[in-house]
Amino acid sequence: MARLPAGPLPSRRGQAPHLRAATPSCSPSRRVRHLLGRRSEAGFLAEVARDWAHLFPVLPHQSEASRRIRWLWGAFEQFRAHLAAGVPAGDCQQIDTSALPVRHTSRVRGPDGWTGPGGLHARFGRDAAHAEWFYGFRLAITTDLGSRIVRAWSIVPAAVNEREAGTDLLEGCPPTWLLAGKGFSGRAYAAEHAARGTTVIVPPTKDQRKTMPTALQKIIAECRSRVETSFTEITDQMELARHGAHTFWGLLTRTAAIIAAHTLLRACLARTDQLT
C-alpha cells in the first residue's frame, strides 16, 4: 500500500480548531460508524451528539472532522495490523481483487483529479464478477482461509495484472497454500511461488473440470466462496462500494477505516472461537 512521507501536517488558513483533543475521537468514530452500518457521516455525527454527548461533549464540524479523518489513514492501517498480529496466520490464505469504482463510466470526459502516489490514476477496467466495465481502481486483499482476517491489502490500477499485485501482497512470510482467482492462473506464477514454498490453487478450467473429481471441485468452490464473502462484507455490508469519496486520499482513508473495522470484527470472532 502507498505510504506518505513522514513530516508535520500541512498548515491551513483560518482559525485554529476549537478542540484539538477531539482529534483522536475521529479515529474510533469512523470504525464504529462502519460497524453500525451508518452510511451518512453527517447523520452519524448528529447521532453521536444526541446519544453520546456524555462521551464527546465537544465535536468538530463535519468538514473539520472529515479533514482530520483524512490525516488518520495510517493510524487505521496500524490498528488493523495490530489486530491481525494478535491472531496467528493460517497456513492457507486466499487472494483476489475487486472493482472499486469512483465514477460512472458515462460521466468520464477526460483527465480528472483521481490521482494517487507513484503515478496511480483512475482508469477503466473490467469487473468480471458483474460482467461490466467500471472507472476507478481495484482493491486487492489477502485473507486467511479460516478466520478471513485481512493480512494485506492494496489499492491498485483498474487494469492491473493481478499476478503482479498478488506478488507484492505476499511479501514476508509466504503461506503454504494460496487459493487464488482465475486472474492468477499461469505456470510462471505458480512456479515462482512454488520456489518460495507456496502451492497456488486456482479454479479449474472447463477442460480441467472434465477430468477433476466432483468432490474436489466442490471443495475448491466452497473455499473460493469465503473470499467472496469477505468482499461482500467489505464492499456491500460496510458500503465501501458506495464510499462517496471525492479524492483519492478520501478513498484511501475510507478503505483503511472499513478494512480496520472488518478486521476488528473478525479478530473478535476468532478469539471467541478460541475460548469456546
Image: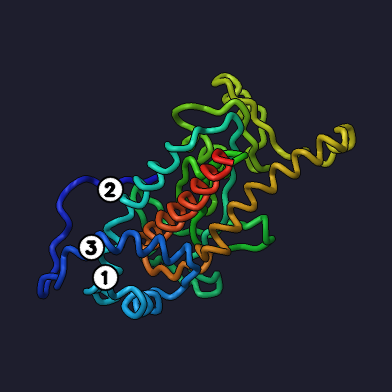
What crowding class fits label 2: few (fewer than 14 Cα within 10 Å), some (14-19), or many (20 or more)? few
Residue 63 % position (x, y):
27, 75
> What label does residue 56 carry, if any?
1
Mark 1 or mark 2, earlier in chain: 2
Q: Is residue 113 above or below residue 271?
A: below
Say whether residue 230 is left or right of residue 7: right
Residue type at mark 2: give it. Answer: Leu
**SS label for mark 2:** loop
Type of colouring: rainbow
Q: How many marks?
A: 3
Closer to the eye: label 2 or 3 = 3
Q: In terms of depth relative to the viewer, which is nearer, 83 or 103?
A: 83
What crowding class fits label 1: few (fewer than 14 Cα within 10 Å), some (14-19), or many (20 or more)? some
Gap in angstroms between the C-alphas marked 2 and 3: 19 Å
Q: Is residue 113 above or below residue 74?
A: below
> What label does residue 235 carry, if any?
none
The residue located at (51%, 41%) in the rendering is 165
Say whether residue 267 is left or right of residue 52: right
User: From this viewpoint, which residue is outermost toward the front?
Assistant: 276
Residue type at mark 1: give it. Answer: Phe
Asked if the residues shown at circle 2 and circle 3 are in contact, with their CB atoms under 8 angstroms apart, the answer is no
Name the residue beneath numbered marker 3: 23
Mark 2 or mark 3, earlier in chain: 2
Say whether residue 11 is left or right of residue 165: left
Asked if the residues shown at circle 1 and circle 2 are in contact, with their CB atoms under 8 angstroms apart, the answer is no
Gap in angstroms between the C-alphas marked 1 and 2: 30 Å
Name the residue beneath numbered marker 2: 4
Gap in angstroms between the C-alphas marked 1 and 3: 11 Å
Residue type at mark 3: give it. Answer: Thr
The residue located at (29%, 75%) in the rendering is 53
